[in-house]
Amino acid sequence: MGTVLVTGGAGFIGSTVVERALERGMTVRVIDSFRSDVHPESELPDDGGRQAAEAAGDARVEVIRGDIRDLETVRDALQGVDVVCHQAGKVGLGVDFSDAPDYVSSNDYGTAVLLRAMGDEGVKRLVYASSMVVYGEGRYRDAAGHDVRPAPRRVDDLESGRFEPIDPATGLPLEPALIAEDSALDPRNVYATSKLAMEYLAASWARSTGGSAVGLRYHNVYGPGMPQNTPYAGVASLFRSALERGEAPRVFEDGGQRRDFVHVRDVAAANLAAIEWTEDAPAGRTRVFNVGSGVVHTIGDMAEALSRAFGGPAPIVTGEYRLGDVRHITASSARIRDELGWQAEVDFEAGMREFASAPLRAAAGTAGATAAGIR
Ligand SMILES: NC(=O)c1ccc[n+]([C@@H]2O[C@H](COP(=O)([O-])OP(=O)(O)OC[C@H]3O[C@@H](n4cnc5c(N)ncnc54)[C@H](O)[C@@H]3O)[C@@H](O)[C@H]2O)c1
């Protein structure tokens, strides 16, 4: 299957993609800046430049400590590469709007430089990490089964514990449904906007260079190596970190928020399926796919499963809320199953049991998290 350059290959998902690509017999190169707010000092390779990948734990991986925003570094990293699997970026909901320049620079400018370098070096195959956040609030139907865009959530409703999105026409709660790739896009924060811009950049690149690009809209990814408690961490990791401190997971709203929790090994397998697809894709072809387990759980369910598996205190449902959070967002992963032959294999309960005792990535930089339900 050739040589793959994994950007962000030292991160949570990227490092799992590296393992999977090696299993499939690919030659792997990693470019990662080892962001100081993501990686603790102890994880850093000795210095910049190329070296055998102790960080990746396998001498078959070449790791370049470098920033994808640096054109010369990326061009150099692309030598001999057949396909790029782009996982580098700044994740999470962030702290506040002051994060905006970093999101746009890391996710959009970084992608633009990477794509420019791929054009320069004639690398024509791209798989990249997008996110379910591009959809904003999930998909809803009214009582008659028609799709309805919910009204924005109102402080009054949330204060009174009315968390379900409301039909603006009738004032009645709407029924959540699975979201498909052709649903309306509605990024609601800077991170989401930066992920959607990546999709448009990749499509522009494919059109103008004849490359092929696959965007994978990951849903809530969890599993070993997930970063610990930071403002950018996913909700599963925040609950797990609380349990480790001997505290009960604190569940926002009424715990009924629906999500699709997908295991990191399944996400890595989806990346490999997408890499394979680009081998025979017609010039200029782009495609996006949801990557979810296909099984709906609530955040309350997840907290309970994790507490049980950990043997810790039962979760506390707090009724707290964040106005910017979406209520429900769950995927239809039918397209990726039909077109790439991928489907999630890790069962939720088994995955949570493993996650309850799996190593997390040590915290770096900032601490003091709030419960971010999406990434
Ligand atoms: N974790 C999730 O639930 C989730 C969900 C949806 C989408 N995603 C996307 O998946 C991708 C990987 O996320 P993750 O959870 O593994 O995050 P992560 O923070 O663990 O990994 C990202 C890696 O990218 C590196 N990086 C960041 N900026 C870089 C730059 N400019 N140059 C080189 N390296 C850089 C970081 O050092 C880090 O190792 C991201 O693009 C993210 O937006 C993640």
Image (spheres, grey):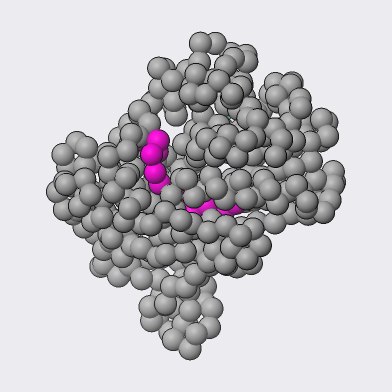
**Residue 76 spot, x, y in % from top left:** 74, 21
Residue projecting furthest to the top:
46
The answer to whether one can see residue 324 in this image is no
Residue 214 magenta:
no
Region in magenta: 216-228
Residue displayed at 36% across by 71% down: 164
User: Of residues 152 and 50, which is closer to you in this image?
Assistant: 50
Q: Is 224 included in the stretch rendered in magenta?
A: yes
The residue depicted at 21 percent of the width and 45 percent of the height is 310
Asked if 180 appears above or below 236 in the picture, the reply is below
Q: Can residue 52 be seen in this view?
A: yes
Q: Which residue lies furthest to the bottom in this view?
A: 144
Q: State whether residue 147 is above or below residue 132.
A: below
Q: Please tell me which residue is depicted at 84% across the width and 51% down the height of the picture.
A: 283
Q: Is residue 282 left or right of residue 318?
A: right
Query: Is residue 359 left or right of 292 when viewed as pictured?
Result: left
Residue 209, quarter of the rendered image? top right
Q: In which quarter of the image is the N terminus?
A: top right
- Quarter of image, res 334: bottom right
